[in-house]
Structure formats: C-alpha cells, structure tokens
C-alpha cells in the first residue's frame, strides 16, 4: 500500500526551509483538520490512511490553500506498509519534524464477555501496534537525520484515565498509549525528541456520531452526551506543535465541558 497519490518529486527540494509533518488517519475528522492546520502553519504534510480517496480530498484542500501535501495510503497495522510510509517520507523530504499518531478505531458498547478475539485484535492492532510501528520508524528517522530531533504527538482519550462503561478493548488500548507516550518521552531525551499526548473527550467526528444517541453511563443511567468542535482539538495540537523542542506537553486534556467525565466511575 505504498503507491503515492501525489508524485513527491514535484513537491519540494532538499533545501526547503519548512518543517515536515506526518498525520495518520488524515482522511477525515481530527486527522484531516490537524493536517490542514499544519499546512497553514507552513509544514509540508505527509497524509497517511487506509482510504486513498479520503486522503486525496485532504490533499486537495491543502493545496488549494497554497500548502504542500504528499498522500501515502497506509495500513498502520502492517509493518511493511508503515515502513514504506516512512521510506517515502525520507526519500521525498529527507526528514520528519512532527508525527501526529491519530489513526484509531473503537467497538460498539459491549460487556467484556461479549468482546470476541477478532475485534479485540483489531482494536489493539490499530490503536496500539499501529502507534508503536509509527513511533518506531519516526524515532529512527528523527534521531538519525541531519539536525536530529522532532516531536511525536499521540492521540489518546479520556479513556486513558477513566473507562467509559462497556469499553474494555478501547480503554485498554488507550491506557497502552499513555505508557508508550511516557516511555518515548523518556527515551527521546538524548536525541531531542519530545513526545506528548492529547486526550480528547467527545469531539464532533464521524466516529463519535453515536454520542448524540442515549449512551450507557456509570450504573444504569442512560443519557445523550454533548460534543465539542473538532477545532478545539486542532488548537490543542497547534499549541503542542508550536513549542520549542526544549518544552513538552506530556498530557493535554481537551473535552466537551459538560460531558460526564469528571466523577465518572
């Protein structure tokens, strides 16, 4: 899945002063919005995701605003596909300054004994192994490139702190992301690599559309949950990226103010 939608040879030359950023899950929702923000900030953006047509829509939006984007259809659960993504980035731009690990999936609400192994593996494969594979390749490139260093931002969740009812697989995956974030933040210190995490609560995306229905809360309560604009998440990532590498936001929580999180559990 390494076929390029855009020919990188026409993008920039090796002397281009702008930074290089990569966004996984860049075809829709938070990923697309963050990619467009990074382009407005002057980054050349590598767009990774499973659906080429969605990536191309993000690319067109970026290029219509004067930005530069490279589409690389990628399955983050596949080590070969992820390696091809970073090889394309290395060949096209020579470096990587920002990675936003955004790709993720979740299951419908269900009790622990209703989660089958196939669904468990799908969630862990995307949300944990996918992040690990991208972190591994990004870390290797960032510490070996000319002017070593860079920033890795992982998309976490409020479930990384407190579980939502009926969310075993997703909760486990996001707790794992917190562990990855802290370990990489520690191991990245000697190489000028900062790693942080943005924990998001109820952004108005396609994946969170069911929030507008009545959802199981703690105990037997059922209620609808408020959503917040994706732009609130974008502004959080924008702040994290704006910092010099000598400063790091280890965990940033951005949530719909009235959602039932504080006191959950």
Image (tube, rainbow, N blue to C red):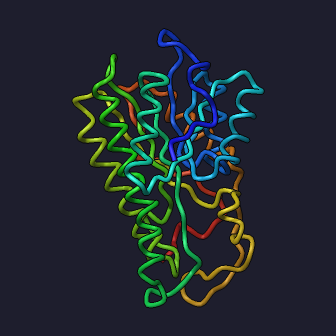
* Residue 253 left/right relative to 255: left
Q: Give the total number of marks visible in the rendering.
A: 0
Where residue 202 appears, as percent x and y from the top left, is 63, 61
* Residue 150 left/right relative to 252: left
Identify the residue at the far top of this view.
15
Closer-to-camera residue (57/191): 57
* Residue 189 left/right relative to 10: left
State the residue at coordinates (44%, 27%): 97
State the residue at coordinates (65%, 63%): 207
| Residue 160 picture quarter | bottom left
State the residue at coordinates (30%, 35%): 140
| Residue 41 picture quarter | top right
Can you say whether 229 is above or below 213 in the image? Answer: above
Closer-to-camera residue (165/18): 18
Closer-to-camera residue (177/94): 94
Where residue 246 appears, as percent x and y from the top left, is 35, 26
Can you say whether 255 is above or below 217 in the image? Answer: above
Closer-to-camera residue (178/124): 124
Can you say whether 210 is above or below 201 in the image? Answer: below
Where residue 200 appears, as percent x and y from the top left, is 55, 55
* Residue 160 left/right relative to 63: left
State the residue at coordinates (43%, 90%): 113
Can you say whether 256 is above or below 142 in the image? Answer: below
Where residue 10 appears, as percent x and y from the top left, is 61, 19
């Amino acid at each position: 899945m390494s076929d390029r939608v855009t020919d990188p040879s026409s993008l920039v030359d090796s002397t281009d002063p702008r930074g290089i950023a990569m966004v996984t899950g860049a075809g829709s929702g938070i990923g697309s919005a963050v990619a467009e923000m990074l382009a407005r900030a002057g980054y050349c953006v590598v767009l990774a995701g499973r659906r080429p047509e969605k990536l191309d829509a993000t690319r067109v939006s970026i290029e219509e605003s004067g930005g530069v984007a490279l589409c690389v259809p990628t399955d983050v659960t596949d080590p070969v596909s992820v390696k091809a993504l970073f090889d394309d980035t290395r060949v096209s731009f020579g470096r990587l300054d920002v990675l936003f690990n955004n790709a993720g999936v979740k299951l419908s609400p269900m009790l622990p004994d209703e989660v089958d192994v196939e669904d468990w593996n799908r969630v862990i494969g995307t949300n944990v192994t996918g992040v690990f594979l991208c972190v591994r390749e990004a870390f290797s490139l960032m510490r070996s490139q000319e002017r070593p260093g860079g920033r890795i931002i992982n998309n976490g969740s409020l479930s990384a702190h407190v579980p939502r009812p009926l969310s075993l697989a997703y909760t486990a995956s996001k707790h794992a992301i917190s562990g990855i974030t802290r370990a990489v933040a520690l191991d990245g210190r000697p190489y000028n690599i900062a790693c942080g995490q943005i924990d998001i609560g109820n952004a108005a995306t396609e994946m969170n559309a069911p929030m507008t229905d009545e959802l199981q809360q703690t105990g037997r309560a059922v209620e609808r949950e408020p959503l917040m604009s994706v732009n609130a998440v974008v502004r959080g990532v924008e702040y994290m990226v704006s910092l010099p590498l000598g400063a790091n936001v280890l965990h940033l929580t951005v949530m719909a103010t009235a959602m039932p999180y504080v006191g959950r559990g």
